[in-house]
């Protein structure tokens, strides 16, 4: 076990981690259960968080790499998440909701990183987010609607 300081949602946590521990497991261990666990390979986007403003799959990111970086979970962007979530609800695409936190984190990162919000750019940016319930057309509509007003 190695001691590190983990900054999550602007709060420092002094914790002990195993050298091979993934960020997802560390976050859940310290109480951030809004970060969901699914594929464990970084392929589905369900565990997405922001690290220094960039979206990453926390299931395939070593906690040890977080030293001196800021992690934001959906809990740290609650107001913005509710706003985006309403657009998803308005399009009827929030079926089971399991993928929603990771999707919202990707939308926030996309909003901050992309200069042009074309359908092609949105689809390319969200390629790492899998939803098994709703399909993607409604999600794309919701994202476009959100980006038009934000």
Image (tube, grey):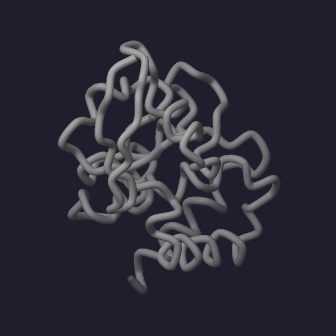
Q: Which residue is drawn at 73% across and 62% down?
A: 93
Image coordinates of residue 35 in percent, x first then y, are 58, 46
Q: Quadrant of the rendered structure where residue 38 is?
A: top right
Is 26 situated above or below 88? above
Q: Quadrant of the rendered structure where residue 40 is?
A: top right
| 125 to the left or right of 36 | left
| 76 to the left or right of 95 | left
| Image quarter hosting the C terminus | bottom left
- Label count reads 0
Q: Residue at x 25, y 59 (%)?
A: 114
Q: Which residue is drawn at 59% across and 55% down?
A: 101
| 110 to the left or right of 73 | left
Point out the residue furthest to the bottom here. Answer: 149
Point out the residue furthest to the top here. Answer: 20
Image coordinates of residue 10 in percent, x first then y, are 32, 62
Is 131 situated above or below 138? above
| Image quarter hosting the N terminus | top left
Question: Depth check: 54 or 66 in front?
Answer: 66
């Amino acid at each position: 076990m190695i001691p590190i300081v983990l900054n999550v949602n602007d709060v420092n946590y002094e914790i002990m981690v195993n050298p091979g521990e993934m960020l997802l497991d560390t976050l859940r261990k310290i109480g951030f259960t809004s970060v969901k666990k699914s594929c464990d390979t970084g392929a589905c986007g369900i565990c997405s968080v922001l690290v220094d403003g960039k979206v990453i799959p926390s299931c395939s990111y070593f906690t040890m790499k977080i030293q001196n970086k800021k992690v934001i979970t959906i809990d740290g962007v609650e107001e913005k998440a509710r706003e985006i979530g309403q657009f998803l609800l308005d399009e009827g695409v929030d079926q089971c909701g399991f993928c929603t936190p990771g999707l919202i984190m990707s939308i926030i990162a996309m909003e901050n990183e992309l200069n042009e919000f074309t359908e092609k750019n949105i689809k390319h940016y969200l390629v790492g987010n899998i939803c098994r319930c709703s399909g993607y057309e409604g999600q794309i509509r919701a994202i476009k609607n959100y980006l038009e007003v934000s």
